[in-house]
Amino acid sequence: MPSERTEVQVRPGIEGDLEALTDLYNHYVRETPITFDTAIFTPEERRPWLLSHPEDGPYRLMVATDTDSQEILGYATSGPFRPKPAYTTSVEVTIYLRPDAAGRGVGTLLYKSLFEALSGEDLHRAYAGIAQPNEASVRLHERFGFRHVGTYREVGRKFGRYWDVAWYERDL
């Protein structure tokens, strides 16, 4: 378990991160309603997702690592908001942290790096859907200027119950 004083580096994700990123995401698939995926992924199944986030352009993958061990602490992405052409200046952003990295500023570093990387792109808005309840994610998004624009009630079913998703947006 990393110490509270871990130095963190944020960089673009690379193909060598695939296994660790898949393991991190699968934790949320198995254990939480934070993602509405219900079946775990193999790294090969997750490869197209990783490759859809190049080092430039509007769809990015930023990875936070422990500077000493190089272990992945979390990641943030921007991706298509919706598939139709008129939505191309909007992105959906998301962030996933290793459970022991939460509450240590890693999410803040990831979003700071992601939004800096996106600042030169032809983008107008970022959107984030947050399965409820998730106060830590709400606080993080609000710190970055996201505002609540609505909640889809009982929109996803996982673990035998329905979950709400609160939607947030911010200008880019």
Image: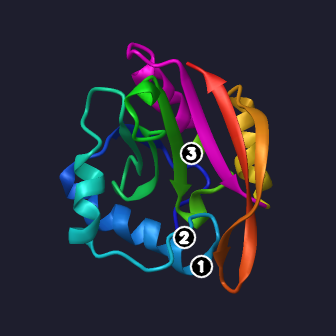
Question: What is the x, y in percent for residue 147?
Answer: 76, 31
The residue positioned 56% from the left and 68% from the top of the image is 36
Q: Quadrant of the C terminus?
A: top right
The residue positioned 70% from the left and 49% from the top of the image is 137
Question: What is the x, y in percent for residue 43?
Answer: 25, 70
Magenta stretch: give its range.
Answer: 109-132
Label 2 CA crowd tier, 10 Å (few <14, some 14–19, many 20+): many
| Residue type, numbered disc 2 | Tyr
The residue positioned 40% from the left and 49% from the top of the image is 65
**Position of residue 37 in the picture relative to residue 11 (left or right):** right
Pointers 1 and 3 in contact (C-beta within 8 Å): no
C-alpha separation, residue under disc 1 versus residue under disc 2: 5 Å
**Position of residue 78 in the picture relative to residue 132 (left or right):** left
Pointer 1: what residue? Answer: 31
**Residue 11 covered by magenta stretch:** no
Pointer 3: what residue? Answer: 106
Is the residue 153 above or below the residue 143 in the image?
A: below
Disc assigned to residue 107:
none
Of the image marks 3 and 2, the number of the one nearer the N terminus? 2
> Helix or strand or loop: what does disc 3 sit on?
helix
**Position of residue 54 in the picture relative to residue 21 (left or right):** left
| Residue type, numbered disc 3 | Val
- Quadrant location of residue 155? bottom right
> Helix or strand or loop: what does disc 1 sit on?
helix
C-alpha separation, residue under disc 1 versus residue under disc 3: 21 Å
- Quadrant location of residue 57? top left
Pointers 3 and 2 in contact (C-beta within 8 Å): no
Pointers 1 and 2 in contact (C-beta within 8 Å): yes
Pointer 2: what residue? Answer: 28
**Residue 131 covered by magenta stretch:** yes
